[in-house]
Structures are given as structure tokens and as C-alpha cells.
Amino acid sequence: PLTEGTHSITYAYEDASGNTSAQSPAFSLTVDTSAPSAPVINTIAGNDIINSSEQSSVITGTNEAGATVSLSIGGTTRAATVTGTTWSYTLTAADITAMGQGAETITATQTDAAGNVSASASKTITVDTSAPSAPVINTIAGNDIINSSEQSSVITGTNEAGATVSLSIGGTTRAATVTGTTWSYTLTAADITAMGQGAETITATQTDAAGN
């Protein structure tokens, strides 16, 4: 039997009298029955977590030269764009819908130039495209009035676990200290100056672990 690789083949005819023709021109035959290794899937969206601003992320990876790459995303087969030994695929809104929220496994296979299909590569990711609710700001200084003795009051509130909390005080952005599902921030003299006297609105936003 022919072994793996490229072979040069010629032939000749022999008639019933035993006369042999000249050798034919050689032709080349390649035997390739070995499946390629699984393609590589690179880290997706920087941390394998897709947030609301990353829904059109480009998934990339590497492959054998001459191969095609097929992905399974949310149970749907997608064809990657292959350039040399790298491939890419841009997520669509339909992909995000198909995957849903939470843990998801994306798989990829490659088919080499001979038609051999690789084993699957897999990448476990998290899809979290839902923004958290607004954090809670507790009553400040007991009655939401800051007097002269309360200029270093601690503002507190609650948040989603794993989130960071940012405050806007007198037009200046301040980072709160978060412990579990509670946050706090101690007012400074600069904050009091920035707010001035009279009515003032303090706002707070939270950014969840996925970046929403």
C-alpha cells in the first residue's frame, strides 16, 4: 500500500505477446489520510466574557495552512474567514441570541486540503450583556442635609456582587470602596467645595463583573 506523502507513479502496457510499451509520463499522487490537529481558539473579548459593548467581538484563532474552519456557536454552524494559518469570525446579534446569557461553549473544527476533519477545539465563555440595576444610595448624614459638622460624612449604599461603584459629586467622579454588596465613600473638603452651598444631586452607577 502507498504510504502517507507524495508519490510519483508511472505505468506501461504489456500485450498478449509480452511486448512492453514505453513508460508513461510520471504523475504525482499525494496520500493524506491523517486528520489535522484541532484548531486553536484565542481568548475572546479579552477575558472570555462578552458584555453589552462586546456583542460584535471578533473571534480569532490559528489553523493548518490550506484548511477551512467551522465554528459551532449557540448550536449554529458558522464558517470562519481563513487567511493563511489564521482564522476569524465576527459575532452577530443572532449569535448572541442563540447563546443566551451565562456560560456557553464555542467549538471549532478544521478540515484540511485533503478533506480530513480535525477533532473539536472548545472555548468556554460567559455571555453577560445585561446591565445591572442602579445601585442604592442610602440617606446621607441622617437626613440628606450636610451641616458644618458632617463635612466628612460617609456615603453608603448597596450594589450587585462583584461590581464597582462610581459616584459623581459636584461634577467630579469618585470611586467608592466596595465590600461584597455594599459600598461606601467618605466625603472630602474638596467634595464640599465642589458641591457648594444649597441643593446638590449626587449620582452613582455600578459596573458589573462583565463590564456592563
Image: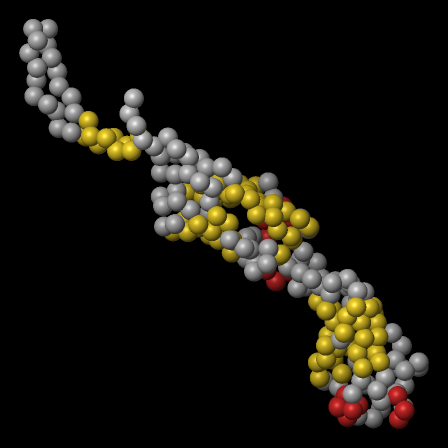
The spot of residue 148 in percent (x, y) is: 89, 93
Q: Is residue 68 above or below residue 145?
A: above
Q: In the figure, is residue 37 to the left or right of 94?
A: left
Instruction: Pick out the residue farthest to the right.
Output: 142
Q: Nearer the viewer, residue 42 or 96?
A: 42
Look at the image and name its color scheme. secondary structure
Q: Is residue 12 above or below residue 196?
A: above
Q: Nearer the viewer, residue 76 or 112?
A: 112
Report the number of numbered marks. Answer: 0
Using the rendered image of the protein, determine whether residue 139 is visible from the camera's viewpoint: yes
The spot of residue 29 in percent (x, y) is: 25, 30
Q: In the figure, is residue 45 to the left or right of 140?
A: left
Of the 4 image quadrants, the one containing the N terminus is top left
Instruction: Pick out the residue farthest to the top.
Output: 17
Q: In the figure, is residue 177 to the left or right of 122?
A: right
Q: Residue at x 52, y 43 (%)?
A: 121
The spot of residue 158 in percent (x, y) is: 83, 68
Q: Residue at x 47, y 41 (%)?
A: 38
Q: Is residue 59 above or below residue 12?
A: below
Using the rendered image of the protein, determine whether residue 89 is visible from the camera's viewpoint: no
Q: In the figure, is residue 208 to the left or right of 137?
A: left
The spot of residue 152 in percent (x, y) is: 84, 87
Of the 4 image quadrants, the one containing the C terminus is bottom right
Q: Residue at x 72, y 84 (%)?
A: 171
Q: Residue at x 90, y 86 (%)?
A: 145
